[in-house]
Image (cartoon, helix red, strand yellow):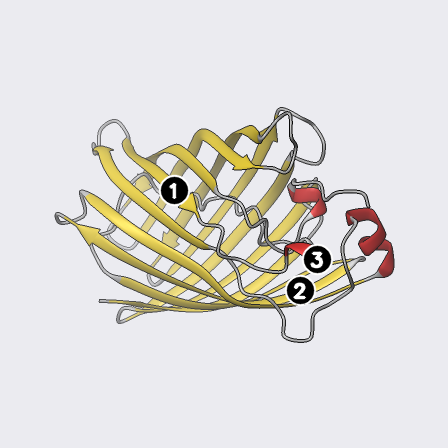
């Protein structure tokens, strides 16, 4: 039997998460998030429930975040099964995903120059349904440097330029090359007006094997905050080795 190919192109939409583009600043408030997501291309329809918890440390000088895919339901075509060398088109009980633990440190904070935050993250091998190429059952980690700078700022509105670059690594089933290394990147803009905020960025991985390991995404997020309650709508357009378009709605509570 032909083996699975451990790259974003040949796995489900949640197997190789691309980190969020952040502002270069670590928030000082606790956050809890619940999100429903829908991912689609002609060979797969996937739905999942995602939860996130963020805990600031030392008044926002550092922080810890935990992400988890509680449940994923998928339905693929036989063409996708054959291309990915998987066991079947779906699993009646669905799948549960990986836990991602991220650590943040504020390296620089300057209104005059830039804000810079360093992130280190570990994705555990806790997800299941490897046979259907949903989750890798192998560890992944990454390190990034997030930077941001205000282009305009007032009491009720702002425009901000932000981006990150770093290193992304995951374990594979290749007996010769046991891991794949990739350059990870993102750049974009964010804007806010009263309680609304809009973020747009272009993000991706550039793996060294070129075997489906170079996904790209155009990501947009619209938030509305009212008294520490946030409604969040997202859309991700997949390109190159990122096959899926993704839609999501989330509720976030700050404390």
Where residue 132 is drawn, which disc sits there? 3
Disc 3 to disc 1, C-alpha distance? 25 Å
Mark 2: few/some/many CA within 10 Å (<14, 14-19, 20+): many
Q: Quadrant of residue 99?
A: bottom left
Q: Which residue has dot 2 on it?
A: 46
Mark 3: few/some/many CA within 10 Å (<14, 14-19, 20+): many
* Residue lying at 53% horizontally and 59% vertically, measured from the top left: 234
Q: Quadrant of residue 106?
A: top left
Q: Secondary structure at mark 1?
A: strand
Q: Secondary structure at mark 2?
A: strand
In the picture, the quarter occupied by the C terminus is bottom left
Say left or right for 249 vs 211: left
Q: Quadrant of residue 5?
A: top right
> Answer yes or no: do the residues labelled 3 and 1 have beta carbons within 8 Å?
no
Q: Which residue has dot 1 on it?
A: 121
User: Residue 45, position in %: x, y?
Assistant: 72, 64
């Amino acid at each position: 039997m032909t083996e699975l190919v451990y790259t974003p192109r040949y796995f489900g939409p949640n197997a190789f998460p691309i980190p969020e583009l952040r502002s270069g600043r670590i928030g000082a408030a606790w956050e809890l998030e619940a999100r429903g997501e829908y991912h689609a291309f002609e060979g797969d329809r996937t739905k999942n429930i995602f939860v996130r918890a963020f805990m600031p440390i030392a008044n926002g000088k550092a922080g810890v975040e935990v992400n988890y895919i509680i449940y994923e339901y998928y339905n693929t075509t036989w063409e996708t099964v054959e291309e990915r060398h998987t066991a079947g088109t779906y699993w009646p009980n669905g799948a549960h995903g990986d836990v991602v633990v991220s650590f943040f440190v504020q390296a620089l904070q300057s209104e005059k120059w830039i804000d810079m935050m360093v992130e280190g993250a570990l994705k555990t091998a806790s997800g299941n349904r490897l046979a259907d190429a949903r989750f890798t059952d192998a560890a992944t980690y990454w390190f990034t440097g997030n930077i941001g700078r205000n282009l305009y700022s007032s009491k009720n509105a702002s425009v901000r330029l932000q981006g990150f670059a770093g290193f992304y690594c995951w374990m594979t089933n290749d007996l010769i090359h046991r891991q794949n290394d990739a350059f990870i990147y993102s750049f974009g803009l964010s804007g806010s007006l009263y309680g609304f905020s809009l973020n747009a960025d272009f993000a991706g991985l550039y793996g060294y094997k070129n075997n489906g390991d170079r996904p790209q995404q155009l990501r947009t997020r619209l938030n509305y905050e009212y008294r520490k309650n946030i409604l969040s709508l997202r859309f991700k357009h997949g390109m190159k080795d990122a096959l899926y378009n993704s839609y999501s709605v989330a509720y976030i509570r700050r404390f």
